[in-house]
Image (cartoon, rainbow, N blue to C red):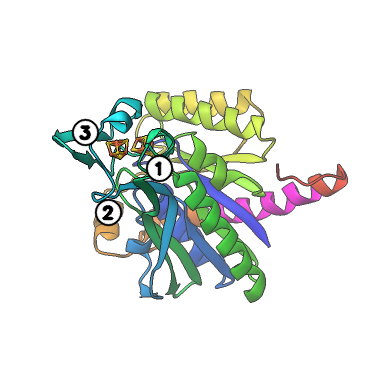
Amino acid sequence: MKQIVVVSGKGGTGKTSFTAAFAELAGRSVVLVDADVDAANLALLLDGSDEPPREYQAGRLARIDPVRCTGCGLCVDACRFDALHLAEPHRVVLQDLACEGCGVCAVVCPEDAVSFVPQRAGQWTVRDTAFGPLVHAELVPGAGNSGKLVALLRETSRGLAERLAASWLLIDGPPGIGCPVHAAVTGTDLLVAVTEPTPSALHDLERLLELAARFRLPAAVVLNKADLDPAGTDLVEAAVAARGVELLGRVPFDPEVPRRLAAGTGLLTVPGVRDAVVACWAAVARRAGRANASAAEEGRDAAV
Ligand code: SF4
Ligand code: SF4
């Protein structure tokens, strides 16, 4: 099984639609993960039925027992996160969104009035799609620990892929280069960065390629909307070449793409785009095989 993570650094480059197209081209031997848990949308492109959702808990929240609490205010003064307030004499109010579950309030409380409950941070499920199972999740807005949730999705999808003897594990990565991205890219066979010929996309691409180098991950680039700005395309190609990273393909812009995506069909239904995406996937498959072979030759796991 080859694990491919598709990332873009910023939104709007077409990362998710490429992941969906790659899933279709993977010959129905694929398990998918939407690791963009803050704004998951791969499921919007892949029809199917979801299993009942499982709750995702992360961290804990303080609870004040109003019977024991005397309203002394010690916990209010001690809370560094400003989560506690004295609403009126003898009544403490806790704001769940501000509580970090650090436990200081329980330490200072002379009345043993503080307890803790697990924090519900989201939910996750498995969707049965036409191309294979899709593991996806929804994080509660403002909830932290998205990296931990991505790690959970990765672990679940890997077990699923092994049980199904799937050839591919395709991960739609989160934006940025922070903790959720680290959780999404770790241990993959190939990082595919989807970019555009714009200065901001190039900046994000540079940061992603630096991340890949730091994690010692094989990386390659897909240049989307390549014909929109020839000068921008030259800059991206020069930056990619300077790093010795392979450009898997150039995909032309077609105004039909957003219309088809909005209608629930994918990149592969747009004739001029289809050939380029098929060529990109062929290059991904070749590179994934090559990446693993070279790792084996070096006597180490390509993953970090
Ligand atoms: S657990 Fe920490 S953050 Fe939450 S209310 Fe208590 S002191 Fe404040
Ligand atoms: S320290 Fe304990 S008793 Fe004092 S206000 Fe906080 S919860 Fe109530």
Secondary structure of residue under mark 1: loop
* Magenta span: 280-294
Q: Quadrant of ligand 1?
A: top left
Check if residue 284 falls in the magenta segment: yes
Instruction: Work out which quarter of the rendered image holds the N terminus and state it.
Output: bottom right
Q: Give the residue type at disc 3.
A: His
Specify few, some or many for label 1: CA neighbours under 10 Å numbering under 14, 14-19, or 20 or more: some
- Which numbered mark, 1 or 2, is in the foreground of this view? 1
Tell me the residue that label 2 is attached to: 256
Q: Earlier in the sequence, mark 1 or mark 3?
A: 3
User: Quarter holding the C terminus?
Assistant: top right
Say whether residue 282 is magenta.
yes
With 221 as the anchor, is 17 left or right in this view?
A: left
Ligand 1 contact, mark 2 (Cβ < 8 Å):
no
Residue 298 seen: yes
From this viewpoint, is residue 276 visible?
A: no
Question: Which of these two is toward me, 140 or 268?
Answer: 140
Nearer mark to the viewer, of 3 and 2: 3
Q: Amino acid at mark 2?
A: Glu
Residue 225 or 221: which is nearer the viewer?
A: 221
Q: Earlier in the sequence, mark 3 or mark 2?
A: 3
Q: Quadrant of residue 213?
A: top right
Task: Name the residue that disc number 3 marks.
Answer: 85
Mark 3 to mark 2 CA distance (whole Å): 54 Å
Q: Quadrant of residue 93?
A: top left
Would you call the spot at circle 3 few (<14 residues within 10 Å), some (14-19), or many (20 or more)? some
Mark 1 residue type: Gly
Residue in view at x 34 percent, y 56 percent: 41
